[in-house]
Image: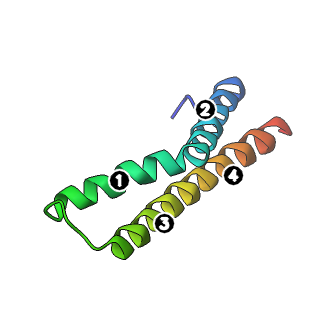
Amino acid sequence: MNILKSPNKMKFVSLVLSLIGLWLMLNSPELGSRSASSWVRSMGGSVDSQEYLQMLKEYISTYKTMGGIFLFVGLFSFLNNHHQ
C-alpha cells in the first residue's frame, strides 16, 4: 500500500490508531456495560446477578485490552517511524 510508504501519512495513521486505543481504554466501562446489557437481552432478559457481573468484568477487560493493544501498536509505530 502506498499510504504506508509515506512517513507523514504513516504518522497520521499511527496517531489515529493510538487515539482509538486511548478512547477504548477510557470508555471501557461504558462499552462493557452496553455489551453486557446486550448479552442479557440475548439471554432472554433475565440472568443471575453474579453471572451478569462476571460478564460485565470480562467485557470491560476485553475493551481495555483491545485499547491497550491499539495504543501500544500506534505509539510504537509512530516512534519507530519517527526515527527513520
Nearer the viewer's eye, disc 4 or disc 1? Answer: 1
Front-most of residues 64 and 3: 64
Q: Residue at x 66, y 50 (%)?
A: 73
Mark 1 vs 3: CB contact within 8 A: no
- Give me the C-alpha separation between circle 4 and circle 1: 24 Å
The mark that comes first in sequence, 2 or 1, is 2
Q: Secondary structure at mark 3?
A: helix
Q: Which residue is mark 3?
A: 57
Residue type, mark 2 in image: Val
* Mark 4 burial class by Cα count in 10 Å: few <14, some 14-19, many 20+: some
Residue 31, image x and y in percent? 44, 47
- Give me the C-alpha separation between circle 4 and circle 2: 12 Å
Front-most of residues 51 and 66: 51
Residue 43, image x and y in percent? 17, 65
- Give me the C-alpha separation between circle 1 and circle 3: 11 Å
Q: Which residue is mark 1?
A: 35
Q: Say the numbered circle drawn on residue 4.
A: none
Q: Secondary structure at mark 2?
A: helix
Q: Which residue is mark 2?
A: 16
